[in-house]
Image (cartoon, grey):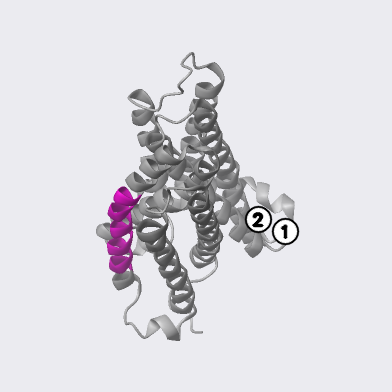
């Protein structure tokens, strides 16, 4: 496997892990009155996502070292290069991610294995602890990549954009799972609440995304005249498709959750959203790992 492919996969796993952690925690809040079996499954979803993120973050750092040395697997362990990159934006970002993901793994494993509460509540201290880890993860994305060359507001926009995407995309699997096990009445309540809150973070996603476009591209023509712009255009197409499916779910399928067929239709629609979201995340990983600004098509 080439270093480029290794970098791409490691970054993709980081993005998937981040979405799982943030979206999963969000759905834990939405399903506070769900059965213990459902909540335990969501806790495991977050913990597994954090564990994947922990290993992927470390792997991504060492893969970059290997890519620089171009001397096989042994090149990943070059002490001199490790020392140099550890003091760079990549090193700081990787360290922050490893620490934050590890914090979440330990917390959620402890919560599911040793908590005396049968309800597995997610509130108070849990929210505070998780919020700190989440902010660390989001902040790490402002330390590397194209945004480091831009103004402070661009870094804030990246953080908000990543947070909004993670809330949305990471919630899809838990919502699909809830369609399988949750009672119809409670499922409808959860979906309606999610739809209301989704309007906030989807709006945030769009506003931050548009602002970043104005910062990263010097002119609209770059969307079709550069490799970066074309890749970004593919991503935007995927996002528009996701927004369209989300609108259909909110306006047509959720109101139809009055019988078993309605639940099946919603579950199938969410499954399609998951597939599209995976494609968008892979394009994002490619965009932020292998494609540089200003590359001609």
Q: Residue at image x 48%, y 31%?
A: 103
Q: Is residue 29 visible?
A: yes
Task: Tell me if residue 200 is in the magenta stretch.
Answer: yes
Whole-percent x, y for residue 238 in the image: 47, 69
The residue that label 1 is drawn on is 71
Among all residues in the image, which is located at the extreme front? 259
Q: Is residue 106 visible?
A: no
From the viewer's perspective, is residue 233 above or below residue 261?
below
Q: Nearer the viewer, residue 138 or 241?
A: 241
Whole-percent x, y for residue 152 in the image: 26, 57
Q: Nearer the viewer, residue 44 or 66?
A: 44
Task: Tell me if residue 82 is in the magenta stretch.
Answer: no
Q: Residue at image x 45%, y 69%?
A: 241
Q: Is residue 174 left or right of residue 158?
A: right
The residue that label 2 is drawn on is 66
Is the magenta region chiefly helix, strand or loop?
A: helix
Q: Nearer the viewer, residue 208 or 59?
A: 208
Q: Residues within 10 Å of mark 2 (few under 14, many from 20)?
A: many
Q: Which stretch is magenta?
A: 195-212
From the viewer's perspective, is residue 186 above or below residue 224?
above
Q: Quadrant of residue 278?
A: bottom right
Secondary structure under badge 2? helix
Counting residues from the start of the chain, the first of labels 1 and 2 encountered is 2
- CB atoms of marks 1 and 2 within 8 Å: yes
Secondary structure under badge 1? loop
- Separation of residues labelled 1 and 2 (CA atoms): 7 Å
Count up the numbered dots: 2
């Amino acid at each position: 496997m080439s270093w480029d492919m290794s970098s791409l996969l490691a970054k993709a796993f980081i993005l998937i892990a981040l979405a799982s952690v943030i979206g999963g925690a969000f759905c834990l809040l939405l399903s506070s009155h769900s059965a213990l079996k459902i909540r335990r499954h969501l806790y495991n979803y977050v913990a597994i996502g954090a564990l994947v993120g922990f290993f992927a973050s470390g792997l991504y750092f060492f893969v970059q070292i290997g890519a620089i040395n171009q001397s096989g697997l042994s090149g990943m362990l070059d002490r001199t290069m490790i020392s140099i990159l550890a003091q760079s934006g990549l090193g700081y970002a990787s360290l922050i991610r490893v620490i934050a993901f590890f914090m979440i793994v330990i917390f959620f494993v402890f919560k599911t294995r040793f908590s005396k509460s049968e309800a597995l509540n997610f509130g108070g201290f849990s929210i505070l602890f998780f919020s700190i880890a989440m902010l660390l993860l989001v902040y790490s994305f402002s330390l590397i990549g194209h945004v480091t060359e831009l103004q402070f507001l661009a870094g804030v926009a990246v953080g908000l954009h990543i947070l909004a995407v993670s809330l949305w995309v990471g919630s899809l699997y838990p919502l699909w799972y809830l369609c399988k096990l949750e009672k119809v009445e409670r499922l409808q309540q959860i979906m309606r609440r999610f739809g209301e809150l989704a309007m906030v973070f989807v709006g945030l996603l769009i506003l931050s995304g548009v602002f970043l476009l104005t910062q990263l591209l010097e002119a609209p023509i770059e969307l079709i005249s550069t490799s970066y712009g074309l890749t970004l255009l593919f991503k935007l197409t995927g996002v528009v498709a996701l927004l369209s499916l989300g609108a259909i779910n909110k306006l047509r399928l959720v109101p139809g959750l009055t019988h078993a067929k309605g639940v099946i239709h919603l579950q199938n629609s969410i499954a399609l959203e998951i597939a599209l979201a995976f494609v968008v995340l892979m394009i994002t990983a490619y965009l932020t790992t292998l494609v540089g600004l200003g590359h001609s098509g």
